[in-house]
Image (spheres, rainbow, N blue to C red):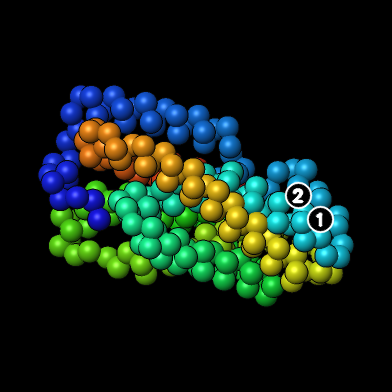
Amino acid sequence: MFPSRIGGAFGLPAMARRHTLALLTLLVLLLGASGDALAHAVAEGDKGYIQEIYGVHLIAFVYLGTKHMVTGYDHILFLLGVIFFLYRMKHIAIYVSLFAIGHSTTMLLGVYFNIGINSYLIDAIIGLSVVYKALDNIGAYQRWFGVQPNTKAATLIFGLFHGFGLSSKIIEYEISPDGLVPNLLAFNVGVEIGQLLALSAILIVMGFWRRTAGFLRHAYTANVAMMCAGFMLVGYQLTGYFVA
């Protein structure tokens, strides 16, 4: 939960507005440059490889899973929101584990049982997960509705949606059933490795930032920027849904 002493008013001072604009400009550039990565797509070369191979290829799928996670900006944004105000490693481990359980469950079961959801719609929901967490971090639900959602349950549930986002893409690529289960397990191992790498980088940056005097002053601005990025992801995916 966002510290109550920060979330008094929703109006941003001039300096905070400038910081927000700078962050949003960077996010727009990232969104434009990463297009497919935001929709859980796989790079064209990797896509061709997935469609052509047969049998068990554990190392290759571990690599693909790791690559997917560290280049998935929606995953990273959500993880950033989840750990933004978590200081103890045991708390971080609990939330990250819940996200991993949800993500892994629907990714594996979705592909194995061929449960596909329209990728644009599922990725729009994933964008909303970023919005949800940013609003939670600024204490919006308590101010607006007088309630605090169960953050652990929300992390698990949104993890399920993140997993469906990936499984829907893999299904579209018609991966060979020969060696499917071990390859999926290897891919999932890679996803978890990628998640640990991304999380380590986030924690290092957050560790330095939290030691500065301006952390609490700029934390609100950062979460507003993250919320705007989530809305941009939603708009990007819904546009694709209605235009495609």
Where 116 falls versus 87 (above or below)?
below
Q: Left of 102 or right of it: where is 140?
A: left
- Res 102 label: none
Taking the image as drawn, is residue 132 in sight? no
Which residue is labeled 1 in the image? 51
In which quadrant of the rendered view does residue 170 lie?
A: bottom right
Taking the image as drawn, is residue 96 in sight? yes
Amino acid at pointer 2? Lys
Which residue is labeled 2 in the image? 47
As drawn, the residue found furthest toward the bottom would be 113
Amino acid at pointer 1? Gln
- Residue depicted at 41% across the width and 55% down the height: 129
- Residue depicted at 63% across the width and 73% down the height: 109
- Residue depicted at 17% across the width and 41% down the height: 10
Contact flag, marks 1 and 2 (Cβ < 8 Å): yes
Mark 2 is surrounded, within 10 Å at the Cα level, by few (under 14), some (14 to 19) or many (20 or more) other residues, namely some
Which of these two is toward me, 114 or 112?
112
Which of these two is toward me, 97 or 145?
97
Q: Secondary structure at mark 1?
A: helix
Q: Secondary structure at mark 2?
A: helix
